[in-house]
Image: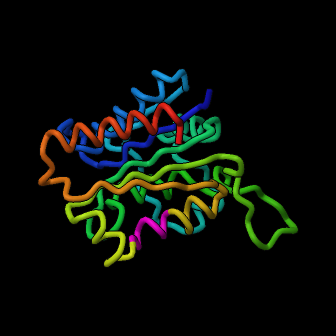
Amino acid sequence: MKSILILDGHPDTADRHLCHALANAYQKGAEAAGHRSTLIRIADIEFPVLRIPSDFQNVPSPNALQPTRDALLEADHLVLIYPLWLGTLPAYTKAFLEQLLHYDTAFERSETDKWPKGKMQGKSARIVLTTGMPALAYTLWYRAHSLKSLKRNIFGFVGFKPVRSTVFGMVEHARPGQISRWLRKMEDLGRRAC
């Protein structure tokens, strides 16, 4: 049994978004398999945007994110689900990660190490991205640039390994049968906690 933190990264609170349904399906599968899961909708949390670089190093995450921080530190596995906007994460989702992963949350402090050591060692992650373009076009033509950056420069850097990914494309044109298959896939990933 694993402890799983699911971050629903769609910045709109309206229930109609596919990201919300994907997050719920993942949690449903995880709980059916006996895993402990916490689902956090980023859109439901009010927090300030990080504006001063030194705050990342020297100030704890905002109080509104402390429950998420605690769940992250307790979790064995992290799932982040978000829509591709202008080629990357929505600004609010990126701001959330910047505030959540302050230095004290994400890294071990050491006077001797010049290179920070991530605290997320021993934890795995999955990134689920939805896009209006075909998944193959995003992966091959655009080289999945935001996904690769998130995997390597954020999740990998703080210690998550392995970091797996799933891309659902052409979401605005998906028929109900396709959406049902995607939801079943997410339930299966949740059951397997991967």
Using the image as rendered, state which of residue 7 and residue 165 is in the foreground. 165
Instruction: Determine if the magenta segment contains residue 145.
Output: yes
Residue 142 on image: x %, y %: 33, 77
Query: In percent of the image, x 29 and y 43: which residue is there?
Result: 182
Looking at the rendering, the stretch of residues picked out in magenta corresponds to: 144-150
Q: Where on the picture, by quarter, is residue 26? A: top left
Using the image as rendered, state which of residue 189 and residue 53 is in the foreground. 189
Query: In percent of the image, x 39 and y 26: which residue is there?
Result: 28
Query: In percent of the image, x 85 and y 65: which residue is there?
Result: 111
Left or right, residue 178 beside residue 151: left
Residue 185 on image: x %, y %: 36, 40
Instruction: Determine if the magenta segment contains residue 189.
Output: no
Left or right, residue 125 beside residue 133: right
Vertical placement of residue 34 versus 17, above or below: above
For the stretch drawn in magenta, the main secondary structure is: helix
Query: In percent of the image, x 60 and y 67: which residue is there?
Result: 54
Using the image as rendered, state which of residue 147 and residue 177 is in the foreground. 177
Residue 6 on image: x %, y %: 46, 39
Vertical placement of residue 103 versus 26, above or below: below
**Quarter of the rendering occupied by the N terminus:** top right
